[in-house]
Image (spheres, rainbow, N blue to C red):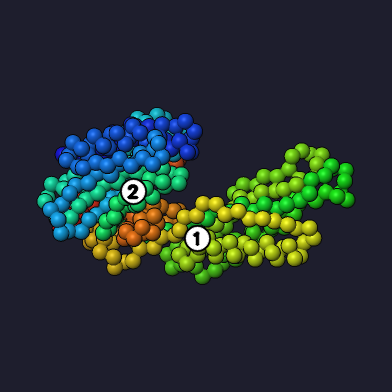
Amino acid sequence: MTSAAEVLRELVSINSVNPDLVPGAAGEVEIAAFCTKWLEARGFEVHRLEERKGRPSIVGIARGRGGGRSLMFNGHIDTVTLAGYDGDPLLPKIEEGKIFGRGSFDMKSGVAAMMVAAARAAKQGLSGDILVACVADEEYASTGTAEVARHFKVDGAVVTEPSHLELTLAHKGFVWFDVVIEGRAAHGSRPDIGIDAITKAGHFLVALEAHGLKLLAGKGHPVLRTGSVHASIIKGGEELSSYPASCRISIERRTIPGETGDSVEEELTAILDGIARAVPDFRYRMERGLERVPFEAKTDEPIVACVRKHATEALGRAPKIRGEPFWTDCAILKEAGIPSLLFGADGAGAHAATEWASIESVEMLSRILERTAVEFCA
């Protein structure tokens, strides 16, 4: 059978830049067609999900005999931009045991490994079903996994984002807010009637920095440590000769288990109300944007124990347990009631000018996933 490294080379050569990140980019259509053809050729029942036109996710199912647990391997097929890559980002280059190219690490390495693992496991006459979910749009809004989770329910899942062959059992979430500080427009020569929204916003920015430092000094989570907050974008004013009527500050708050969009809104409201009581003419409104919840897996979940067992056997040692500061599709699967964890290949350069995956780790990942599927679905 084709090796995982060979499949990875094919995947890297296909342009699948997310068009929500780069307007007009290729998206997932071509790579979804490749995954469909590959899975169908190996006897998988293939489903195409495409609620957003031109943004397909592919789910291949190897049906078991019945009576066993079902398992999903999940990996995203979109990438970030090709711009700024050092060399040809779509030319998979092999040097010193590494495959270079855009998406080689994040995360076509995991997609290749899970496809080959599922195909090999399916030949062993399992009782349970194996699902291979090649999903769209993880790099922007994760609409692909959200759509898959609405249509398919399984007993366990492994998201094959790169993790250096370590088990990721927790990661942070995030919530976005826009805080609009309201002033009063006037000619620059009329301080008697103008209210400068930008200088009023300065009071909030100082308070936000102090709040961020307080968060970092807190007790936090045993693996993820603490949440954080920062001002990402600030917009205000029309021209030099006018008092600005408003100033919009876009904020990202990274969250840990136990923190929610509601709890973050309460803490920001307390800060803003305190400023309003102390600063004359300080007025604001707040708008909540995208929220993604944090993730934490139970260590005694059968899928976690199964992956840990086979990773230990393959590595000759127990794999490290880790948490991630970034968000992943594991959180969507958990919200859908699917126990999951993140486990992927080794390499470096996600979103960077040079990106690579270790061939040895990709092949080892595939073997661990195959053995996990055989035991979990038996």
Q: Residue at x 86, y 50 (%)?
A: 193
Q: Position of residue 211 (x, y in %)?
A: 62, 63
Badge 1 marks a residue whose secondary structure is strand
Point out residue 97 in the picture as x, y percentages from the top left corner: 28, 40
Mark-to-mark CA distance, 2 and 1: 25 Å
In this view, the residue in front, 248 or 83, is 248
Q: Position of residue 81 (x, y in %)?
A: 45, 36
Residue type, label 1: Thr
Image quadrant containing the N terminus: top left
Task: Tell me the element at label 2.
Answer: helix
Disc ID at residue 328: none
The residue positioned 76% from the left and 38% from the top of the image is 239
Residue 215 seen in render: yes
109 shown above or below 225: above
Do the CB atoms of the residues marked 2 and 1 lie less than 8 Å apart? no
Question: Closer to us: mark 2 or mark 1?
Answer: 2
Q: Name the residue at 67% across, 55% down.
A: 285
Q: Which mark is residue 148?
A: 2
Q: Amino acid at mark 2?
A: Val
How many discs appear?
2
Mark 1 lies on residue: 255
Q: Is residue 269 left or right of residue 354?
A: right
**Would residue 99 be found to the left or right of residue 45 on screen?**
right
Assign the C terminus to one quadrant of the image. Answer: bottom left
Comes first in the chain, label 2 or label 1: 2
Indicate left or right for 253 with 63 as reference. Answer: right
**In the foreground, 132 or 358:** 132
User: Is any atom of residue 77 visible in this view?
Assistant: no
Check the image and name the residue furthest to the bottom: 219
- Estimate the x, y position of residue 249 in percent, counting from the top left: 64, 50
For residue 45, above or below residue 251: above
Q: Residue at x 17, y 39 (%)?
A: 42
